[in-house]
Image (tube, grey):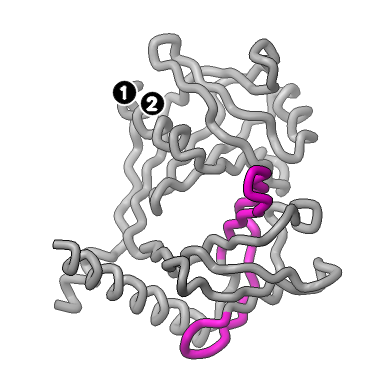
Amino acid sequence: MSNALNAEDAPQPPKVLSTPLEISGNLRQLQESHDPLIITFHERSQRFQSYLIDIDRDRNMIALDEMIPRDGERYLLAGEPFKVEGFHEGVRIAWESNGQLTIDESGGSRCYRGTLPDEVVYHQRRNAFRAALKLAQLVNVDLDGEKLKAPISGKLLDISATGCKLRFDGDITGSLQLGQVYDRFMAALPFGKMTAPVELRYLHFEEKISTTFAGIRFHNMSGLVQRQVERFVYQLQREARRFDKDDL
């Protein structure tokens, strides 16, 4: 049984999608789920966040939301090549820039329009199974380190072998920076506290509920911490399978 599970959870090789139908279909998943995108310019280390807000296969066009931070616009307008990367339910969807984007403010908000990518890399990584926690059992977390004036406390929403999603009360976006590595992330797991450095990959403040959501990727984890994370993910995975069977 364990060998079968290991084979199922093994990373799948990336696929290159090249037909407009495949490309637009997969990009639409990112758009409809409001999955965050990370934009990186080839010659620069800074990361910028955006969202897909429009896909029109008939017109061979896509539109990206205004970049955060906005100073990435000047690289965009200068025609610097860039890469876009998003994650949808554990699947990495990424593409390279396909010509220069133009700024459009006609709809009352700022966005960038360009042509549909010629190719999209689709990478299903089964080993990064993401396990969601039930509201009643959310784990307390603290984000701390030299880059922060004071620790920030929140809750763990879901976790995988490579990272997790967090929830914080209020607007903490001014205290954190995308792409930054924070050297002390602590989570009070049921069988003991884990501590690891993490990289901030996603940050969004939801004004309606006054809550900040963050996505982090584990950074240079020790073997001990990796085993703690894998044990917790496996425990959640096992519980989820049990509840699925109960539903049936």
Q: Around disc 1, counting alpha carbons within 10 Å, would you say few (fewer than 14), some (14 to 19), or many (20 or more)?
A: few
Please provide percent x and percent y for residue 144: 74, 73
Residue shown at 51% from the left, 38% from the top: 34
Q: Which mark is residue 24?
A: 2
Q: Is residue 211 magenta?
A: yes
Residue pointed to by mark 1? 21
Residue shown at 45% from the left, 39% from the top: 33
Residue kind at label 1, given as amino acid type:
Leu
Q: Quadrant of the N terminus?
A: bottom left
Q: Quadrant of residue 18?
A: top left
Q: Quadrant of residue 105?
A: top right
Residue shown at 46% from the left, 78% from the top: 229
**CB-based contact (under 8 Å), mark 1 and mark 2:** yes
Please provide percent x and percent y for residue 242: 22, 72
133, above or below 19, in the image = below
Q: Which mark is residue 45?
A: none
Q: Is residue 47 magenta?
A: no
Q: Is residue 16 left or right of residue 151?
A: left
Closer to us: 178 or 98: 178
185, above or below 27, in the image = below
Which residues, given as a range, are shown in magenta? Answer: 188-217
Please provide percent x and percent y for residue 10: 29, 64
Residue kind at label 2, given as amino acid type:
Ser
What secondary structure is marked by label 2?
helix
What secondary structure is marked by label 1?
helix
Please provide percent x and percent y for residue 167: 60, 61
Closer to us: 19 or 199: 199
Q: Quadrant of the C terminus?
A: bottom left
